[in-house]
Amino acid sequence: MNKWLFNADTVDKALKHLMESGHKVASGDRLGKTIIFAKNNAHAEFIRERFDAAYPEYAGHFARVVTYKTEYAQSLIDDFSVKEKTPHIAISVDMLDTGIDVPEVVNLVFFKLVRSVSKFWQMIGRGTRLRADLYGPSADKKDFYVFDFCMNLEYFNQPGAGAEGSLQKSLAQRLFEARLGLVAALDGSDLGGDIDALRKDTAESLHKIVAGMNLDNFIVRPEREWVQRYRLVTVDCTVSAGGG
């Protein structure tokens, strides 16, 4: 996770995507008010450094870190709350997750994992405030964008995800592990007939899941060596009891 979050190329591409695709104001000339939710203070500073390097014309004022460690943080929040004042990007760790009311916010960037369902929706709530004439006379704010670089939306779309204080496994993961355990239990059973067919069908379904995994997926990427290896494994091989 840290290698992903603190990777310069990753951050540069994320910021480029935000700057190109985010909601714009000032007749489309400037990125609208944006909150980037960072993992920790070091990560927030790293994002700011990469932004200043990529956009030197905006360095030092357009994107600012706003955390509990930031000197004059409340002053920065007050400036952020004013439509025409900088900063236009607030890089936050917890401080802007809840309670802040800035109707001008039109872009939310999730650059950290969130596993509390209540906190997640509170963070989403930072973009739900209405704002009249945001884009010009009679051009009101009607929506906002969510840039989710850590697959939080995918996580919370799974049944049972988001239990408070829990890092519970998703239903898909639990089913996969149960089927894997079944295959391992049936290996060497020597019962033949329907049992062999059950083992073969279960192994084939697992193999299809592995073969269909996207190697560029954020979750898959750290395990791509194993995914590539087991894509090539035939379903007739046995599964080791130690995990396979």
Image (cartoon, rainbow, N blue to C red):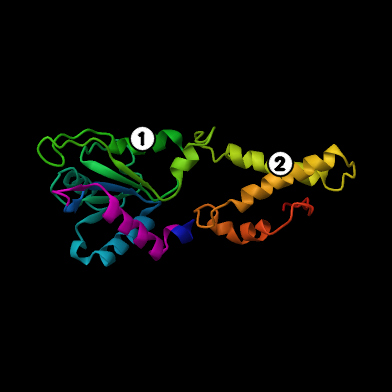
Residue position marked by numbered label 2 in the rendering = 179
Magenta stretch holds residue 20: yes
Magenta range is: 5-28
| Residue 61 percent across, percent down from the top left | 19, 58
Amino acid type, callout 1: Gln
- The answer to whether residue 66 is seen in the rendering is no
Closer to us: 181 or 102: 181
Amino acid type, callout 2: Arg
Left or right: 17 with respect to 55? right
- The answer to whether residue 116 is seen in the rendering is yes
CA–CA distance in space, label 2 to label 1:
36 Å
Q: Residue 162 carries which label?
A: none
Is label 2 or label 1 in front? 2
Report the predominant secondary structure element of the magenta stretch.
Answer: helix
Left or right: 11 with respect to 162? left
Closer to us: 88 or 77: 88
What is the secondary structure assignment of the residue under circle 1?
helix
Q: Which residue occupies 42% across, 61% down?
A: 6
Residue position marked by numbered label 1 in the rendering = 122
| Residue 59 percent across, percent down from the top left | 21, 63
Q: How crowded is mark 2: few (under 14 residues within 10 Å), some or many (20 or more)?
A: some
